[in-house]
Image (spheres, rainbow, N blue to C red):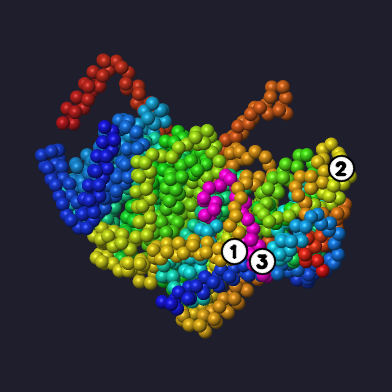
Amino acid sequence: MIAGAALGLLQVFVVAAGAPLLVGVLRTLKARLVGRRGPSPWQPYADLRKLLGKDAVVSETTSWIFRVTPYVLTASMLVTALVIPVLVTRPPLGFAGNIVLLMYLFLLGTFFLALAGLDAGSAFGGMGSSREVAVAALAEPTVILAVFALALRAGTINLGGVVERVEAEPWLAVNPAHLLAFAAFFIVMLAETGRLPVDNPATHLELTMIHEAMVLEYSGRYLALVEWAAAMKLFLFLTLLANLFFPWGVTHLAEPVPVALGLLALVGKLAVLTTLLALVETSVAKLRLFRVPELLAGSFALAILSVMAVFLLR
Amino acid sequence: MLRQLRLALQTGIVAEPAPRTSELERVGERLRTDILRRFGRSLHIRQVDAGSCNGCELEITGLTGPHWDLERFGLHFVASPRHADCLLVTGPVTRNMAEALRRTWDATPDPKFVIAVGDCGRDGGIFRDAYAVVGGVERVVPVDAVIPGCPPSPAALLAGLLDAIGRLG
Amino acid sequence: MARLGYALAAVLGLAAVGGGAAGMLGREWTLAVPWLVPLGGLELALDPLGGFFLALVGAAAVPASIYAIGAAGGAARGVGAYLVFVAAMCAVPLAANVMTFALAWELMSLASYFLVLHERERPESVQAAWAYAVMTHVGLACLLGGMLLLSAWTGSVRFADWRAGAPLLAAGARDLAFALLALGFAGKAGVIPLHIWLPLAHPAAPSHVSALMSGVMIKLGVYGLMRAGVDWLGGGPAWWGTALLLAGVVSAVVGVLYALVEHDLKRLLAFHSIENVGIILMGLGAGMLYRQAGLGGLALLGLVAALYHTANHAAFKGLLFLAAGAVVHATGTRDVERLGGLIKRMPWTAACFLVGAAAISALPPLNGFVSEWLTFVALLQNTQIAAPPLNLVFALGIAGLALTSGLAMACFVKAFGITFLALPRSDAAAGAREAGPAMRAGMALLVAACVALGLGPTVVLPRLAAVAAPLAGAGAPARPALGDWLTVQLSGDFASLSPLAIAAALTLGLAAPLVALRLAGASRRRRLYETWGCGRMLQTARMEYTATAFANPFKRVFDFFYRPAKRLDIEFHPESRLFVERIEYANPTRSIFEDWLYRPVLAGLHAAARSVRPIQSGSANLYLAYILVALIVLLVFA
């Protein structure tokens, strides 16, 4: 019981504390790829610390929705960190949910953030909300079908079960169905976490924004929470990609040494995925907004192919 | 895509070394006290064009490129004054922009400071006393520092910004 | 007097909950009065499935009636019809023979017809009632056709005898009976393309009636589908389940797509009813397919998912209609483009609507999530059926359900965000007042239901499984393993869920950042200032994003479905074309079903009527000649 709670806290700590570093490393890598020295990987921590020291300016048009949203967003990410196999296959709260739950936990955050975008009554916020929910809605079918392809193999949609199953048969990682599902999920990750070519996290131009436009009104501690939650979302999506598709190192033992090894393995896998993400982000341009659905349709097609490949190669 | 990546890897990092001296003119004592402590590692800047000829903007844009790369110092341009710690104001403040500038200052959360850029920002420059111009930035919002020049070069801008948060040299 | 009537309806609802709960727990009860009506007499019987729907009707009628006490404000119009409506809905799931069923069904339709005509001064209401009357009677004709055929073939008008006799009928006869019954019930359930009356009729009725019509009346269509599919006829070939599953997918996706571009608050909710009936049918269709494949456990799961979603939809859709009614009551408009800022003026209503919106968007830990999760789990296990075409149908269902839930979330961000947040877009919205205590009490009851059904699947599921077990066919476990008090555990290790644990974790997750911020010494000061608009002066409601703009990305993405017709109308100044006096821009969507299905049918009907019109000349001599000819023909054939 106590070991379980400690393990849960450890997972939450790894996600919560590691997420800003992940974003920092990604930014540094992207800067290096375009010939800049770039910020230090630790920069997001300094940003968050500074934001906590600042006052908040809140629009007088807004309601309690606007003020509650950062907390809901953070809470949904923290709960996700408890449910998914970050270090161990069966985290303490793993019994409480599965991939379908994850999908809806992310939707919970999106729902509130989109409402907060509308709350201030500015045109930017509404624009961001509208686009964010459009992208989220169109990404849903891909997520669930990619998951379905995994569940077909594993005979379960419980995350721990999927991980154990893929771990038991290492050659699954090079199975075509598996790789197709991975590609589909990777594209969905780009869309859900607001990366290029779907959304440019570094843009200053309101008219091209998706995620940024919704958070234009946030300041001080609220902004810190929103940014932190966004970083955790990226961390969690990459962790899902790493551990569901390549679950090497994720242990089912709740003991210090295997967990530490699991942490090391996770760091390694995340480093690879982050580099891949940085390469993708520096080498593609942002898509026109109404081209994004085509990208998502492409990822959906990949997911369908992956499901069919499972049937064919059975 | 691959060619582009190869080019990027071959070129390497082209950032210039950090500047050593600055021409920053401090107005008042605020910058000496709390700013250094708070913004030394992270400063988010909102740039406000209050009627500039866009000469300063061109130079400011140069800051984000690979050569001057202000992000390596933890400085960052943001899209909303809500996210900003510092307003970087250019231009002689025109009558049409005075109110917008005031609102932008009000929209920025405390603690915050203002840097006026260029000779126009300092006192109106060559546009001083023109009928459409209010004057320097400090006529509208409290200014904490000035980076002079017409326009100031990216090096001067970077030096001034680093000086303001106490990271010069 | 009117208040007394609604109070009576609430008491009736309570009694129905009690009776229904007894039925769900297995208490059998019958009442037969053979002399009261011809053709078999009045006969009522309570069984678990009927008990579930009876309890559902009662549970929805209680809050709706309490709400009506406040909303109707003592106006007498419609009380009688309302009472008849509730009573008839209670009778439908109890009916045990054709005559009783037809009477109760028609009484329910007629009473609701009069309620739709509530504002009979308005031409839209009259038109809505007309469309409703026509569609409901086309459905009734199909139903009666199917029931009379079954009666003739089995030799009995009692449903109990059908259970014994129908499985022995020839396959073609069973197919025909199912098709007729399914068409009739699907029309009542609002399944696409028979949905055309639903978005017209539901908004036209008073909101407490809309809540009942959407919450439970269309569910009686689902009840009929369940009875016909798995009870009376005792299951059938794979195409029955496939048809229901596909109809569910189409209804869900199309319903939510129409809702997205709809800006009349109550019509939007009505389209969501179509969507949710689609989700219910996915569970039901999956259950029937599993049943046909002999997978009793999975069939049970599909049926339970359908039943759970039925109950959930009654709770959150009832809640949403009541809250929307409170908005209409306060502002006098249903057009979301004229609303806004109501969260400050009607905080209770806003909070209730938010709970309903989160529940219908299937956000954890509310009830919509639990039943959509169950439906997913039911659909995802289709690999146990070894028939690739069917697996593909299931995959379509899975993707459709995922798309639907995403789009529903988007639609409710729009519905809640535009209606309740930011600045009011009209004087009516600016001057809105909070709803009265009775209305709030009605909504609060449904909020409690949404939360309880969301947190308590471990309590609810065994009861529903007991209801569905007799219907799930061979191999269905009588007491399936569903996990313990904390966790729902389905199909061994396939899927588990614990809403209680999730809710507890979410609460902790909400508290954790609060504590962390305090410990980190974060600034707690907050300054109010105007919305950031690039330094622009005078923020007004006209600068807000509108519902139309919000829905526009979807209109662009799905333009093959909406087929928007762009109209731009510019009026220039008479002196110079450089000066524009007025610009009117419209981008309405067109309905595929109206254009390609209903219009041709109606046109055909009209053409047929025109071609036989010459027979009706008005001349008495000619009519006498018709009579003579008819007599001669009869004599010849006799």
**For the residues carrying marks 1 and 2, which lies nearer the camera in this image?**
1
Q: Residue at x 65, y 38 (%)?
A: C538
Front-lying residue, A165 or C115: C115
Q: Are marks 3 and 2 in contact (CB under 8 Å)?
A: no
Where are the magenta residues, as a range?
Answer: A41-69
- Tell me, for residue C521, which label it has, or none: 1
* Horizontal relation, residue A39 to residue C464: left or right: right
**Where residue B114 sits in the image (x, y, percent)?**
75, 53
Q: Identify the image quadrant of the C terminus of chain C.
A: top left
**For the residues carrying marks 3 and 1, which lies nearer the camera in this image?**
1
Front-lying residue, A12 or C391: A12
Q: Are marks 3 and 1 on the same chain?
A: no
**Where residue C478 sits in the image (x, y, percent)?**
24, 65
- Tell me, for residue B128, which label it has, or none: 2
- Tell me, for residue A46, which label it has, or none: 3
Front-lying residue, A172 or A274: A274
Q: Disc 3 on helix, strand or loop?
A: helix
**Where residue C470 sits in the image (x, y, percent)?**
24, 60
CA–CA distance in space, label 1 to label 2: 45 Å
Provide the chain ID for the residue under circle 2.
B
* Horizontal relation, residue C363 to residue C217: left or right: right
Instruction: Look at the image and tell me whether residue B82 can be seen.
Output: yes
